[in-house]
């Protein structure tokens, strides 16, 4: 489904990626792990290239999604036509809009009215708390609720593939579990998921496979249950 | 001062405020979405009036089509709104968008807007000359009077149109997905494309709304005061901008209320004091208002986003 090959990218003057290659197959839930500054977010932001200064500059390599090269596709087209949605770092929900409007705005490019109605129900099933707070301004939500809203919003884009950038950041452990359970649920309902995460513990618990990055390179990859038992991973990322 | 004069001035102020309110809406819409003070907007009002003049002349002065004058008036309004939108969007495409693409400091964009306004004024001057033109009478003026209070059909139309336009605009902003997108852009422009929304198209739509409101104000203005001249947009544009700021720029309710507030202050100052003091007192009042509430009546302080 998604295939990144030999990607070199700069973030400003910093050479952030040195030949990253990875793939995500349809129906998978894949995690990208690594320490701060390893290049995880840069990899993600290379797929969804927002206007500068958010976007990395790609020097070399390719990003194919269902045989289409995404390198020169603007982000709104990536979302609207290729069905990829991003839950950005820091959530970036629209605080001046209500919860319901945040979900509605994500359907901007969609015309499948019946499916949209079903998708609202699916989001509210997954996160009943959003239903309770439908009419509230989104900036009145707690951090965990905002993360739920950001995920629900990505789903409302009609995405079959969702990218997440550090969804657990700043959340209490029980909320992280709740969110990853919801992600797993989405995945089981057919959404492919690629999640960048510093918290290897939780990511390896829920993902099928994972990649580990260090200083702009993929240094390890494998099935989650293999990585959990890998002594190097245990030492460097799992605190064991 | 008896109640008759009070009510009469109240009605006059409603009409006068309608023009400010309609123009102020355009300032506030563009500012809300782009954080850009579009100083060319007053001249867009002038362009709207001139385009209305052009369509009115074409529709009445030819021997091919003979339409009832009220139909000519409606067509004049609609055609002027459409054509003026093209002018507004052209400014955005030619002048503002290239600067935005380069990530230019907003100050330069504001200066560019000022220059665009001057180009529109002086372009008009070059093409049509400095002589004033009079707008054809498309609506026969009828004056109704009730116990010493008079109101014309044109005045009623101006006031009603301003309110209807405001309600329509408010509905678009509150209820439609494109309106939500406009509000979302003002909060976090970077996150908007992540919703599958082409930001440039929303910006163009914003200019269409703002310019068509200015054109509506322009045609109504010359229907009420049928004189056109190239600088007609300058003073009224500045005043409407101030009205938008006093109302709380970026908030469309604020622009609307601010427009009427300015209209009321001006008319009532002129009713009590020599008219030469009108602007002096009006702006002093607004200055005091702003120093009490710097964000404007409906405004809130926003963190600067770059």
Image (cartoon, coloured by chain):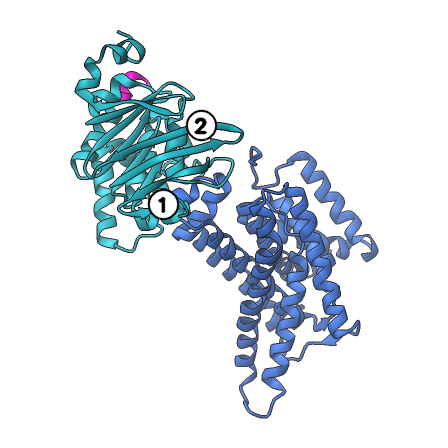
Q: Residue at x 23, y 21 (%)?
A: A204
Is residue B139 something that shows in the picture?
A: no
| Residue under numbered circle 1 | A70
Query: What is the crowding at mark 1: few (fewer than 14 residues within 10 Å), some, or many (at least 20)?
Result: many
Chain ID at mark 1:
A
Chain ID at mark 2:
A
Image quarter of the C terminus of chain A: top left
Q: Residue at x 74, y 74 (%)?
A: B128
Give the label on residue A16, or none: 2
User: Which sits in the foreground, B135 or B268?
Assistant: B135
For label 1, the SS is loop
User: Which sits in the foreground, A208 or B262?
Assistant: A208
Q: How many numbered markers are drawn?
A: 2
Residue A150, by quadrant, is top left
Query: What is the crowding at mark 2: few (fewer than 14 residues within 10 Å), some, or many (at least 20)?
Result: many
In the rendered image, residue A38, in percent from the top left (x then y), is placed at 40, 22
Residue stretch rendered in magenta on the structure: A172-176
In the rendered image, residue B69, in percent from the top left (x then y), is placed at 57, 83
Colour applied to chain A: cyan
Q: Residue at x 55, y 67 (%)?
A: B81
In the rendered image, residue B151, in percent from the top left (x then y), is placed at 63, 69
For label 2, the SS is strand
Chain drawn blue in the picture = B
């Amino acid at each position: 489904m998604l295939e990144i090959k030999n990607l070199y990218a700069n973030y400003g003057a910093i050479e952030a990626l040195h030949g990253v290659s990875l793939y995500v197959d349809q129906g998978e839930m894949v995690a990208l792990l690594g320490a701060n500054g390893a290049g995880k977010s840069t990899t993600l932001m290379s797929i969804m290239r927002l206007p500068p200064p958010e976007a990395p500059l790609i020097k070399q390599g390719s990003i194919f999604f269902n045989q289409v090269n995404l390198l020169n596709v603007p982000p709104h087209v990536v979302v609207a036509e290729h069905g990829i949605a991003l839950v950005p770092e820091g959530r970036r929900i629209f605080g001046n809009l209500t919860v319901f409007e945040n979900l509605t705005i994500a359907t901007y490019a969609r015309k499948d009215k019946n499916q949209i109605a079903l998708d609202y129900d699916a989001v509210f099933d997954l996160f009943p708390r959003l239903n309770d707070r439908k009419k509230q301004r989104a900036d009145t939500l707690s951090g965990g609720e905002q993360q739920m809203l950001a995920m629900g919003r990505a789903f409302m884009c009609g995405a079959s593939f969702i990218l997440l950038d550090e969804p657990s950041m700043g959340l209490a452990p029980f909320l992280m579990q709740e969110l990853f359970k919801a992600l797993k649920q989405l995945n089981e309902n057919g959404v492919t998921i690629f999640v960048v995460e510093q918290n290897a513990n939780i990511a390896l618990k829920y993902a099928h496979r994972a990649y580990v990055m260090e200083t702009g390179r993929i240094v390890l990859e494998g099935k989650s249950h293999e990585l959990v038992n890998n002594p190097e991973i245990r030492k460097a990322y799992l605190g064991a | 001062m008896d109640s008759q004069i009070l009510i009469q001035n109240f009605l006059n102020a409603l009409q006068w405020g309608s023009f400010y309110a309609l123009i102020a809406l355009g300032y506030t819409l563009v500012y809300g979405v782009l954080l850009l003070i579009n100083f060319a907007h007053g001249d867009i009002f002038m362009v709207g009036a001139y385009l209305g003049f052009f369509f009115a002349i074409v529709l009445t002065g030819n021997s091919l089509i003979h339409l009832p004058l009220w139909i000519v008036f409606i067509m004049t309004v609609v055609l002027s709104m459409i054509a003026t939108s093209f002018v507004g969007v052209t400014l955005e495409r030619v002048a503002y968008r290239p600067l935005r693409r380069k990530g230019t400091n907003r100050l330069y964009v504001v200066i560019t807007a000022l220059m665009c306004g001057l180009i529109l004024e002086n372009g008009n001057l070059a093409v049509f000359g400095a002589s004033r033109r009079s707008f054809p009478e498309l609506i026969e003026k009828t004056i109704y009077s009730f116990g010493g209070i008079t109101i014309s059909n044109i005045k009623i139309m101006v006031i009603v149109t301003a309110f209807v336009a405001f309600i329509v605009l408010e509905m678009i902003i509150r209820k439609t997905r494109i309106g939500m997108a406009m509000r979302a852009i003002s909060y976090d422009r970077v996150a908007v494309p992540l919703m599958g929304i082409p930001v440039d198209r929303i910006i163009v739509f914003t200019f269409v709304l703002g310019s068509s409101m200015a054109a509506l104000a322009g045609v109504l203005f010359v229907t009420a005061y049928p004189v056109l001249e190239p600088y007609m947009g300058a003073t009224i544009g500045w005043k409407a901008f101030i009205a938008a700021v006093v109302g709380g720029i970026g908030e469309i309710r604020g622009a609307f209320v601010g427009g009427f507030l300015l209209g009321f202050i001006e008319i009532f100052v002129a009713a009590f004091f020599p008219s030469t003091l009108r602007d002096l007192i009006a702006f002093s009042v607004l200055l005091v208002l702003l120093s009490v509430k710097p964000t404007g009546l409906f405004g809130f302080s926003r963190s600067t986003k770059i």
